[in-house]
Amino acid sequence: MRLRRDKTWSQQQLAIKLRVGPNANGGLLTWERRRLLIHAAKTALAATFCWWLALRFGMRDGYWGAISSIIVLQSNVGATVTASRDRLLGTLIGAALGFTFSLFGPLWLSYIFALLAAVILCGLLNLRNSSRLAGVTVTIVMLVHKDGPRWGLAFDRTEEVLLGIVVALAVSTLVFPDRARLRLRDGLAQEFLMLGAFFEAILEGFRGTPAQNLAAMRDGLHSTLAGNSQLLEASRLEPSGGPGWREGLSLLSQFGQSIYDVLLALDLSVEGSREDGFAQQLEPAIGKLAADIQSGFHHVAGCIHKWHFEAPPQGISLEQDIRDLEARMDAVRHTGIGFSQAEILRAYAVQLHLKQIARLLRASRIETSLAVRDTRE
């Protein structure tokens, strides 16, 4: 079985851009380091500006607003919105409960019940990320000793946190905005390139020469899938992009996970193969399907990168490849008596997984194209 290993110029450039090429990490100021510097500068800007505003408006504890802006300002807009929501809700719940329970009974007892109520209420409202913030706010409102009524302390705390959240959202959105949906787009393109590389490495084992870095590739893919899943959640809360982006990114994420699961099953199927004779009889149909699948991974990655899915890959017909492989399987079925049962079962399992990967890959482009096109019209 032979796969086409030569990549076109555009595929090489895409691999380098998405940091999976040989020149991905060259230079002192890499893409990751630039993002780190920008995030550090935005954090410093948000905190300093928030502190300045607090002084201008006469807030007594303006540093709480600066702390809030530091906490909620994340690496992308969507994650910042999520963190802001969690912190604001936690602060509101904690301030309300802290003030209410401070009106009853001895302080140590009311403090215990206020914390219990804050954590339980956040859990019942499915706001688990807000529960710790609610507890912190309860503690500040009830245990910090200051002149004036408790309701004033609760109001000041909420006002300062709200200021920090507004400043953080403004800086995240207006100053070198890092959109989660754009990062996810590039992450998914990288994911499909990595899936293609993992696919080729698995088939090297089926040919009898297992790839040395298969375990590392599997771990890398697992980390990429997890990171993209987090970006998908963040992108759903971003104020821009439109439903076409959200639905398309969600579909691609689901297809990527499904293809990864099938690749894991394919990896188990080829275990123990050593130039199986029965599988060799499936040539050239099985080799053609595998080669077109590999090219299909690169095509889908390019479609994701450009965010255009209408054009089918040139010179590739996965459905025709599947029909040819099925016809070849029927033609050699009668020769199975001359081979071991393990070889026959392995060949059947491999061709079934190849067909499933091909159909998932084809559907990922077509269904995403429909989702994006429907929202444009």
Image (spheres, rainbow, N blue to C red):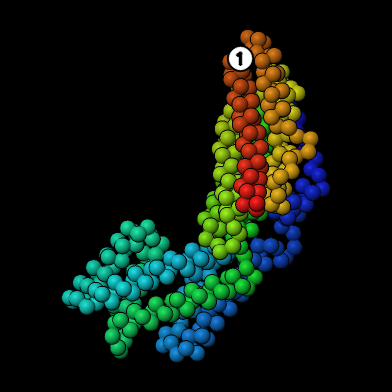
Query: In the picture, residue 177 is in which quadrant?
Result: bottom right
Query: Looking at the image, which residue is at 64% across and 66% down?
Result: 35
Q: Residue furthest right?
A: 9
**Closer to the camera, 1 or 91?**
91
Residue type, mark 1 in image: Ser
Is residue 191 visible to the viewer in this orientation of the structure?
no
**Residue 269: image location, x then y, percent:** 58, 28
- Image-based side of 104 in relation to 226, left or right: left
Question: What residue is shown at x 69% (from left), y 14% (from top)?
Answer: 331
Q: Which residue is mark 1?
A: 340
Quarter holding the N terminus?
top right
Above or below: residue 17 compared with residue 164: above
Rendered location of residue 167, percent (x, y): 53, 76
Q: Which of these two is toward me, 220 or 124?
A: 124
Q: Residue furthest left?
A: 105
Answer above or below: position of 338 versus 221. Answer: above
The picture places residue 113, in percent across and down from the top left corner, at: 23, 68
Residue visible at 63% across and 38% down in the picture:
363
At label 1, counting other C-alpha atoms closer than 10 Å, the crowd grade (few under 14, some 14-19, many 20 or more) is few
Is residue 243 visible to us here? yes
From the top left corner, tell me how far across and down residue 60 is, in percent.
Answer: 41, 88
